[in-house]
Amino acid sequence: MIYVAVLGYGTVGSGVVEVLERNKEAVRGKTGDEIKVKYVLDLREFPGDPVMDVLVHDYSVILNDPEVQIIAEVMGGTGAAYTFTKQALEAGKSVCTSNKALVAAHGTELMHIAEAHNCNYMFEASCGGAIPIIRPLRTSLSAEVIDEVTGILNGTTNYILSEMSTKGAEFDDVLREAQAKGYAEANPEADVEGHDAGRKIAILSSLAYGQYVDYEDVYTEGITKITATDFKYAAALGTRVKLLGTSKKVGSKYFCMVCPVMIDAENPLYGVMDVFNAIFVHGNMLGDCMFYGSGAGKLPTASAVVSDIIDEARHIGKCLVTNWDNSRLPLMDIGEVENRFFVRMKGSLIDNLCRVEKVFGKVQAVSVPELADEFAFVTDVMREAEYREKAARLDGILSMIRARF
Ligand code: HSE
């Protein structure tokens, strides 16, 4: 028997208990032993729920029980979750988590502690929910030199952008609808401002390139300024706007950024709609590879946590190697990163194209018949700094979205 404890009986925590119960035989087959939840830690009571038989309110009960070898931390946050994880690893108990905020902020230190105490700190559920991506980066793709990771890493914003794209709706209206359906948090800031995706691309990049990427170094722009009008142009251009987390090697340097990007149907991420997530990886031997699936939700996320519990159960007393060095990966200045730029401008196309091309050179111009007072253009590839310098010389720019097509 392998005893585990679950910290937090919220959505994911109750999902972990459910997956272990419903898939008990499948889990036993893969582990060679039964995995039993000995404790669930939560401050609340759950009258009538069978969890009451194993519910504890005091973490020291779990920490001081030598029978507990694996802890699933699904309480979230970087306060108590950090302290509890650290104490568990120092006691030689493996920990797995869905807590991307903790992995992004303290993953390097926690993996180091796990290594020193012959146990593991795993976080398959921290990025892309049920999509297998952390383990593939750690193992299946370990022969690769990876030079790009680009993902739709946030289900909430992908749902909002998909609805805006297909229904022509405005951001605020779709956000309200997403909140009513439970697809967006009451406080949606971390999602819509791109911080959630920023933490996830930092985690994936740390694994892909072997040096840790500090999420605070990731250039981040959210989707709050994207409008229904942008999608009218996107349709005219045969493109969609997606919130992409991208990290890429350019020469010997790397950049890492989260921002809305216009992509066309040739991009494998174009067809990823609604709450789905997908992660595109490019390796020097494998070429292109994409991982797709449910990026959130109780049971998909819990399933990923349980996959870590099984992996840790199979490796009691042995720390598995993770290619995540504790030196910080220096990132390129965002001004050096190259993109095309989709730019909306006041006025008519005929009256202004000459002026635009004097500054930007040849551009791809686009107008939408129902938008009489404005037009748009897509520049050639250029550095962000060059775009900013040129845009500052042109009166009448309304907005800009990066374009990769
Ligand atoms: N808020 C996150 C999302 C949850 O929408 O993707 C999963 O990390």
Image: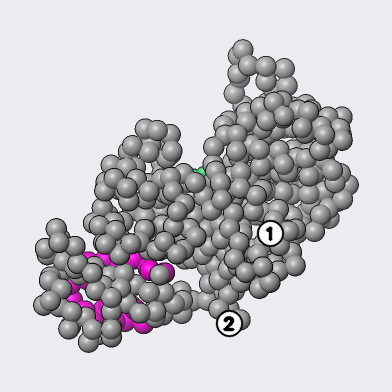
Vertical placement of residue 135 versus 402, above or below: above
Residue in front for this viewpoint, 367 or 260: 367
The residue depicted at 15 percent of the width and 78 percent of the height is 352
Vertical placement of residue 26 versus 226, above or below: above
Percent from the top left, x then y, of residue 129? 59, 45
Question: What amino acid is labelled 1 in the image?
Answer: Leu
Residue in front for this viewpoint, 337 or 71: 337
Percent from the top left, x then y, of residue 358? 22, 87
The reply to whether residue 78 is visible in this rendering is: no
The residue depicted at 64 percent of the width and 36 percent of the height is 302
Residue in front for this viewpoint, 45 or 249: 249
Quarter occupied by the C terminus: bottom left
- Left or right? Give the position of 383 relative to 103: left
- Left or right? Give the position of 170 relative to 218: left
Question: What amino acid is labelled 2 in the image?
Answer: Gly
- Residue 387 is inside the magenta segment: yes
| Span highlighted in magenta in the image | 386-404
- Residue 74 is inside the magenta segment: no
Q: Is mark 1 within 8 Å of ligand 1?
A: no
The label shown at residue 251 is 2
